[in-house]
Each structure stands twice: as C-alpha cells, then as structure tokens.
Image: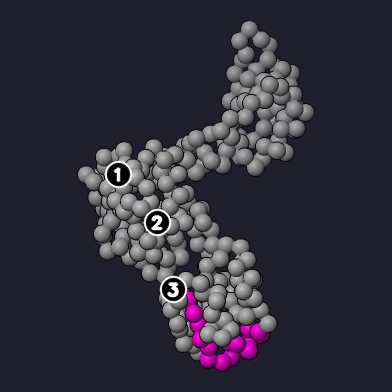
C-alpha cells in the first residue's frame, strides 16, 4: 500500500516539513525537488502549489495533504478536514481606501480585485453589491484607488494594507493550515489506518510543543499544598524519594503558564525544579 501525500511549496513548507520531521517522517531532498523521497516506504510524496492541492485531492489524484482553509473554501473542494494545524493564521478581508466611506462605496457599482474569485464574488453578492470582478495575481493591495474600489486579500497583521492606505471593512473568513484527505481514501481500510495514525502523531507533536515537563522535590508536609498549586493534564505524578522523607513530583504543563507558575511552586514548597521539553503528548 502506497499513500499519496501532497505537500505545499512556498511559505507553508518550512513548518510542515518540521512537523513531519518531528513526527518521524524525514524528507529527502529540498523544496526544489517536486517528488522528495522519505524514510517511510508507505508514503509517496509530491509537492505542489498550495492553491492546487484541494481540488486535486477532491479529484482523487492524491490521498491526503496539507492546505489552507482559505483555498479549500475558494476551490469549494470536497475534502475531509482531519486536523487544524494552526499554522499561518490569516484573515480573508475586504478593504477599501482609508479615506473612503464604506456605505457610499457599497451603494454604487464597484470594481473588486482579488485572487479569491469565489470568496469575493459570493461575499459581494450576499451584500447585494453590484460589481465587476478582476482577477489578481499577487500584490492585490496596489490596485486601489485608481484600478479598484475594493480588494479581498489575506492578511495576518493588516500591516501591508495600512502601509498602502487601505482599511478593512469586513472579514470573510479566518484560515489556518489543515491536514485533509480525499474521502475515498478513508474508505480504504489500509489507507484509513495509515492516515489516522498520522493524525494521532501530528496531534501529539502539536500538543507536545505547547507543553514542558516540570519536575521538582518537596517535603512530605508540603506535598498537598504543592499538588494543589500544580496544574496537570490529569494529576501530577508523585513518587517517594529514595532513602529520603520527601517526594518527587512531576507534571506536563502549558509553556505559557511556567513564568507565573514557578514562584507559586517555590512558595508551595517545591525545590530542585527542572524544566524539560516535551516532544509528544498522546492523551
């Protein structure tokens, strides 16, 4: 059984290749190689532009792959969304020149420019706005005010729009990178088993990145106080110290809790605190 996995080129590649590596799937070659090998004999990998992945998955050309939710929606591709990886979060927004009035703009026929023909057209039709659509091929923000009245584009911070004197008037959707599959691949028991295994490992890597393992010691009379102060996935692990009266305590905690948590743990009686990274977490 060979599972056909498709990976996007461009800005998404680095984070996805790191996820694959941390999951034990090591690509052989570089981003210029459209058919990289890997150490998993069950995988056959191909690289494509992100925009091409959802429709090709929906056609059954590949079994599973990675794509932005924006292009899945734009292509109206019937794929199975298996896991939100959270990579490259962006908003798809409608923008006009910063000194224009939105109510006045929408009351007349406008020129709308975007790479997203379906998303843009559907949005304007629902708004009841009369428009002419012009397909953009990058640098959408350069069109207004001379060549467009409104643009629909993706943005992570809005900085580029502001630098080009545009303001956001509406958000069409939010998008992140997803791990998706052709529904027909999930009907094949062998392929489904492999895909579900990949989802499990990907999820464990992502959860591991959010956590660290805290280990510490404490005296017996402070144990209850320390455990009460220590968050954990279920409950902390507690074990008796060898030839000592105290206890060793450990728990996997969220990274963003550590800064405020450490002084509380010291106050609750923790000593010899160690913080170590977590590679995977499988609930």
| Image vertical order of residue 128 relative to residue 234, above or below | below
Residue 14 locus on image (x, y percent): 46, 49
In percent of the image, x 75 and y 32: which residue is there? 263
Q: Residues within 10 Å of mark 1 (few under 14, many from 20)?
A: some
The Cα atoms of the two marked residues, 2 and 1, are separated by 15 Å
Say if residue 169 shows up in the picture. no
| Image vertical order of residue 59 relative to residue 201, above or below | below
Q: Is tag 2's residue or tag 3's residue first in the polypeptide sequence? A: 2
Residue 257 locus on image (x, y percent): 67, 40
Bounds of the magenta segment: 100-115
Q: Is tag 3's residue or tag 1's residue first in the polypeptide sequence? A: 1
In percent of the image, x 42 and y 46: which residue is there? 17
Q: Is tag 2's residue or tag 1's residue first in the polypeptide sequence? A: 2
- Identify the element where label 3 is drawn: loop
Q: Residues within 10 Å of mark 3 (few under 14, many from 20)?
A: few
Q: Which mark is residue 37?
A: 1
Q: Which mark is residue 9?
A: 2
Say if residue 106 shows up in the picture. yes
Disc 3 target residue? 137
Residue 118 locus on image (x, y percent): 42, 76
The Cα atoms of the two marked residues, 3 and 1, are separated by 31 Å
| Foreground of the two, 278 or 222 | 278
């Amino acid at each position: 059984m060979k599972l056909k996995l498709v990976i996007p080129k461009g800005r998404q590649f680095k984070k996805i290749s790191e996820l694959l590596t941390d999951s034990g799937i090591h690509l052989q070659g570089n981003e210029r190689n459209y058919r990289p090998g890997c150490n998993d004999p069950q995988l056959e990998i191909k690289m494509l532009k992100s925009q091409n992945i959802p429709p090709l998955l929906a056609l059954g050309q590949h079994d599973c792959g990675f794509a932005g939710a924006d292009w899945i929606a734009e292509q109206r591709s019937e794929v199975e969304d298996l896991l939100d990886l959270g990579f490259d979060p962006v908003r798809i927004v409608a923008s006009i020149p910063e000194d224009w009035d939105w109510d006045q703009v929408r009351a007349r026929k406008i020129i709308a420019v975007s790479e997203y023909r379906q998303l843009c057209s559907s949005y304007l039709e629902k708004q009841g706005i009369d428009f002419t659509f012009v397909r953009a091929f990058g640098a959408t923000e350069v069109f207004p005010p001379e060549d467009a009245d409104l643009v629909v584009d993706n943005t992570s911070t809005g900085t580029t729009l502001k630098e080009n004197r545009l303001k956001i008037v509406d958000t069409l959707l939010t998008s992140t990178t997803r791990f998706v599959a052709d529904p027909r691949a999930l009907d094949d028991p062998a392929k489904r088993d492999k895909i579900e295994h990949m989802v499990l490992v990907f999820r464990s890597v992502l959860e591991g990145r959010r956590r660290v393992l805290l280990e510490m010691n404490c005296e017996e009379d402070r144990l209850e106080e320390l455990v009460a102060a220590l968050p954990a996935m279920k409950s902390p692990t507690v074990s008796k110290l060898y030839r000592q009266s105290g206890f060793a305590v450990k728990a996997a905690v969220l990274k963003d809790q550590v800064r405020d948590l450490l002084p509380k743990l010291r106050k609750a009686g923790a000593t010899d605190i160690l913080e170590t990274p977590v590679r995977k977490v499988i609930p």
